[in-house]
Every structure is written in C-alpha cells, then in structure tokens.
C-alpha cells in the first residue's frame, strides 16, 4: 500500500458536497450502499438529508467523515447506529468509482476502525455487504473484519435475490493484531 496516495479522514466542507452528492445519487452502486429500492436523488433531497442527518448525528453520536486523497474528497466513511451503552457501531463506506479497487477503501475503513476503537472506546464494529460485492468484502477482511454470518437471499439486487454477508471486528481482535492498545 506504500504506492497509494495518502488517505485521510476529515470533516465535511461545502467544497465536498458535489462529490458526495455524485456518490449518493449513483444508481449503479445503490444496492451496495442502501437496503432501500433505488430511486433518483435530486440535489435538493440530498441537501435536506444532510441537514436532517446532522441534527440526528449530534444527538446520537453517529459520525461521518470525508475520505480525502491528495486534498480531494473521494467519498465518505461513517459510524452510524452508534450504541453508547453496548459500545458498538456499524461501519459504512461510499467512494467515487475512480477510488475503488485501489486500496483507498481499505485504508479508509482501517482508519475508521482505529477511530472507533481508540477515540470512541467502542467494543465492536460491524457491517453488512451484499455477497456479490467481492471487492468490498476483501477490503473489509484486509482491514481485520471477519465474516460472522449470512442473511440468505435477503436483498433484491439488480433483478435477483442476494445474500447479505455480516462482518464484524471486536476490540480485542484489533488489539491482538499488533495495533496499539
């Protein structure tokens, strides 16, 4: 991964909104990002969703970061469904097409995991992926996630039912892999 551009996570700025909208409105990858049926997304709907999410995030501690490569936004990563009592959260990622398959997602997820365990004192981080998204599953495994189970034929994806792969990582596993305690 030394040949990759530097990947960092940061807060969203107004300059990032066009890129983030393009990712959110991408119907070709909708099923990789959402369990709902794909629908066209207008910029006005996107902006309204961001405003609502900001209000909810502040009250629930959910977090979203921009994935930055070389000073430019290429997507986002998030820790939604943050449970302060049980100390777990879900992980999510969405990248522009040009950032996929280059190790950027793996690096971003690894940084999100570090943030979740070291800065938020989480005990567990989990995620879901459709079974056909082999690149994402590989990236999650490289970041330390393990397959915990499957929801068989749980998602309707581009005209067929697909399994949802459930993955997770425990804090003890992350520390056991040579990461700082």
Image: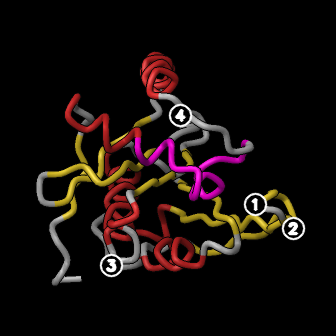
Q: Nearer the viewer, mark 4 or mark 2?
A: 2
For marks 3 and 1, give the one nearer the viewer. Answer: 1
Marks 2, 3: nearer the viewer? 2
Q: Which residue position is annotated with label 3? A: 178
The C terminus, quarter of image: bottom left
Query: Above or below — where is 162 with respect to 26?
Result: below
Element class at badge 1: strand
Q: Do the residues labelled 3 and 1 touch (CB within 8 Å)?
A: no
Residue shown at 61%/41% (left/top)?
86
Q: Position of residue 66 (x, y in %)?
A: 30, 45
- Mark before the other along the chain sequence, 4 or 3: 4
Q: Which of marks 1 and 2 is in front?
A: 1
Q: Main secondary structure of the magenta part?
A: helix
Disc marking residue 157: 1
The earlier-in-sequence mark between 4 and 1 is 4
Looking at the picture, does residue 97 appear above or below residue 52? below
How far apart marks 2 and 3 lie (CA) works out to 34 Å
Q: Distance between the residues labelled 3 and 1?
A: 38 Å
Q: Name the residue under label 4.
A: 84
Magenta region: which residues?
22-36
Left or right, 164 with respect to 127, comes to right
Sequence-first disc among 3 and 1: 1
The Cα atoms of the two marked residues, 1 and 2, are separated by 13 Å
Question: What secondary structure is marked by label 3?
Answer: loop
């Amino acid at each position: 991964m030394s040949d990759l551009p530097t990947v960092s996570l940061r807060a969203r700025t107004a300059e990032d909104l066009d890129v983030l909208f393009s990712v959110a409105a991408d119907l070709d990858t909708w099923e990789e990002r959402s369990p709902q049926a794909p629908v066209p997304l207008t910029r006005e709907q996107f902006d309204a969703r961001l405003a609502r999410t900001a209000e909810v995030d502040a009250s629930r501690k959910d977090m979203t970061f921009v994935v930055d490569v070389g000073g430019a936004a290429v997507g986002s990563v998030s820790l939604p469904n943050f449970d302060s009592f049980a100390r777990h959260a879900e992980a999510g990622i969405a990248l522009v097409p040009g950032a996929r398959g280059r190790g950027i997602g793996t690096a971003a997820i690894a940084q999100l995991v570090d943030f979740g365990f070291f800065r938020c004192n989480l005990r567990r981080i989990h995620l879901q992926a459709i079974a056909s998204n082999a690149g994402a599953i590989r990236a999650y495994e490289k970041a330390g996630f393990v397959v915990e189970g499957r929801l068989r034929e749980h998602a309707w994806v581009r005209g067929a039912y697909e399994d949802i792969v459930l993955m997770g990582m425990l804090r003890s596993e992350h520390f056991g892999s040579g990461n700082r305690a």
